[in-house]
Image (spheres, helix red, strand yellow):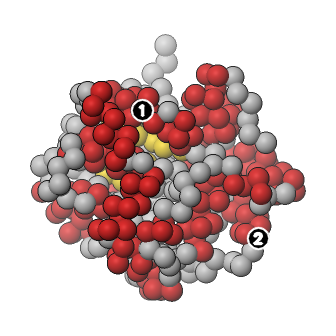
């Protein structure tokens, strides 16, 4: 049997949102957890589940953005402060990233939870996210020092124009989709190639929707958390879409309104799948088929459209 070398960082991701170099301050602990998604694939959902697993609903626990910092975000505070926060944490750490595996340092003692979603559903959520950026947030993204490339543009007025750009252009030279953010398909593909590693768990958004209890149990078992039936029921309840939106609206809506028009209501918009059918034409979807063939292998594309549950049930891809 041929043993492959461990994944290594081969690219730097530095733009208006990201700076993968910030991970150089990360000093891994044996029980660390890293949550990685491209975007709009259930990041906040998984972070809430992990917060409930780690803190067991403790009302004195730090809020999720502080407990689980987004390390590669250029705009989330001075790096020294973020590193000091991580270093001082005494709970089991769970750090957020939007980096693909070729830009994120891999440590065999760290557990990686990678979350993905049907790209067409990612797009619909991203459209809402992008079009609700406030002027202040756009200025913040473009006024910071240390970025790379062109300024981050304002969202276009036409959703299908955005789709065409998102499907056919890449922000970084090695990408061919994801503009003006970063590649969605490449992110998933980078982890898919290493899915057999014992410390990598791939979670699908559609599976979380279809069977939250089963998926939360799967995540807890993988991470070594003991979870009673009562504890599982509580996590399902307090990680529901409506509950998360209510919590953020109550505790952090002012901060949310600095980033998104409408605050928590805009950030937690629908949380559903399938809305793309009412928006994208056959011509639009042909661009998606081309992007799949360019960027990811067929088995990865099938998983993105069906998830583990759909694959096991023999479901056909959504069309």
Judge whether 186 appears above or below 75 on screen. above
Residue that numbered label 2 is attached to = 161
Name above or below for residue 303 compared with residue 158.
above
Residue 106 showing in the rendered view: no
Location of the C terminus (image quadrant):
top right
Q: Nearer the viewer, mark 1 or mark 2?
A: 1
Q: Residue 53, relative to residue 40: is it above or below?
A: above
- Above-or-below relation of 31 to 97: above
Taking the image as shown, residue 281 lies to the left or right of residue 179, namely right
Q: Position of residue 307 (x, y in %)?
A: 59, 34
- Measured in 3D between alpha carbons, the distance from the residue under mark 1 to the one under mark 2, in whole angstroms, is 38 Å
Q: Residues within 10 Å of mark 1 (few under 14, many from 20)?
A: some
Image point (37%, 68%), residue name: 249
Question: Which residue is at a point 45% across and 36% down the rendered structure image?
Answer: 212
**Viewer-proximal residue among 225 and 104:** 225
User: What residue did someone put label 1 on?
Assistant: 213
Instruction: Report the residue at 45% width, 52% height from top.
Output: 241
- The picture quadrant where one finds residue 33 is top left
């Amino acid at each position: 049997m041929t043993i492959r070398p461990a994944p290594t960082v081969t690219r730097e991701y530095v733009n208006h949102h990201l700076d993968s170099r910030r991970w150089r301050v990360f000093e891994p602990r044996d029980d660390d957890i890293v949550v990685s998604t491209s975007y709009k694939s259930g990041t906040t959902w998984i972070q809430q589940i992990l917060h409930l697993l780690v803190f067991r609903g403790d009302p004195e626990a730090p809020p999720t953005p502080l407990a689980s910092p987004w390390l590669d975000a250029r705009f989330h505070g001075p790096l020294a402060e973020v590193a000091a926060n991580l270093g001082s944490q005494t709970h089991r750490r769970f750090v957020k990233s939007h980096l693909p595996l070729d830009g994120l340092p891999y440590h065999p003692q760290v557990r990686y939870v990678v979350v993905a979603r049907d790209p067409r559903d990612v797009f619909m959520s991203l459209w809402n996210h992008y079009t609700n950026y406030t002027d202040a947030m756009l200025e913040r993204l473009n006024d910071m020092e240390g970025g790379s490339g062109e300024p981050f543009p304002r969202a276009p007025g036409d959703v299908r124009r955005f789709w065409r750009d998102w499907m056919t252009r890449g922000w970084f030279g090695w990408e061919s989709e994801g503009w003006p953010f970063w590649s969605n398909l490449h992110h998933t593909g980078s982890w898919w190639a290493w899915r057999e590693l014992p410390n990598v768990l791939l979670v699908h958004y559609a599976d979380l929707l279809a069977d939250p209890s089963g998926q939360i149990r799967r995540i807890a078992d993988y991470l070594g958390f003991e979870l009673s039936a009562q504890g599982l029921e509580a996590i399902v309840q307090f990680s529901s879409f409506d509950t998360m939106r209510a919590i953020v609206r109550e505790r952090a809506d002012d901060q949310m309104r600095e980033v998104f028009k409408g605050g928590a209501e805009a950030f937690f918009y629908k949380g559903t799948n399938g809305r793309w059918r009412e928006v994208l034409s056959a011509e639009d979807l042909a661009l998606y088929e081309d992007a799949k063939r360019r960027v990811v292998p067929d088995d990865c594309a099938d998983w993105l459209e069906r998830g583990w549950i759909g694959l096991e049930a023999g479901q056909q891809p959504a069309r």
